Amino acid sequence: MKKYLSSHIGRFRLLALLEGTSLLFLIFIAMPLKYMFDIPEGSQFVGPIHGVLFLLFIVYAIVLHFDLNWKFFRTTWKVLVSSFIPFGTFYTDHKILKKYHT
């Protein structure tokens, strides 16, 4: 865990894991509970948490764009778009972010 907290890219990878997990929980657990079984508590709890994690993810990706001199159309936009797609942050972590984290 110390490896992830000791650098910007490590913290971003951890944030990507949390954001991706919250998106999956929201889409596959909280929303079906809300709309199929009329149990809104899951989305009322997870929704705001995911919103904060999503905003942190976007801001941190832009910060890393400048810190690591990412090319926008080669790296940054892929990282940003991955936050909208279920399992996208996990794929991006594996294909893009891992090579920046030593």
Image (tube, rainbow, N blue to C red):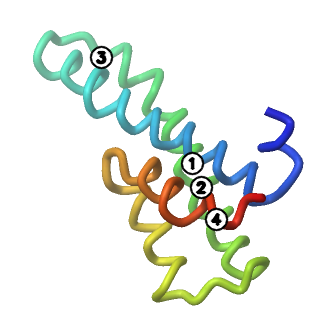
Q: CA distance from mark 1 to mark 3?
A: 25 Å
Q: Where is mark 2, residue-wise? A: 57
* Dot placed on the residue nearer the N-terminal end, 3 or 2: 3
Q: Position of residue 36 (x, y in %)?
A: 11, 17
What amino acid is labelled 2 in the image? Phe
What amino acid is labelled 4 in the image? Lys
* Dot placed on the residue nearer the N-terminal end, 1 or 2: 1
**Placement of the C terminus among the 4 image quadrants:** bottom right
Q: Secondary structure at mark 4?
A: helix
Contact between labelled residues 4 and 2, with CB atoms less than 8 Å apart: no
Q: Where is mark 4, residue-wise? A: 99
What amino acid is labelled 3 in the image? Pro
Q: CA distance from mark 4 to mark 3?
A: 40 Å
Nearer the observer: mark 4 or 3; the answer is 4
Q: Where is mark 1, residue-wise? A: 16
Nearer the observer: mark 1 or 3; the answer is 1
Q: CA distance from mark 1 to mark 4?
A: 15 Å
Q: CA distance from mark 2 to mark 4?
A: 18 Å
Q: Where is mark 3, residue-wise? A: 40
Nearer the observer: mark 3 or 2; the answer is 2
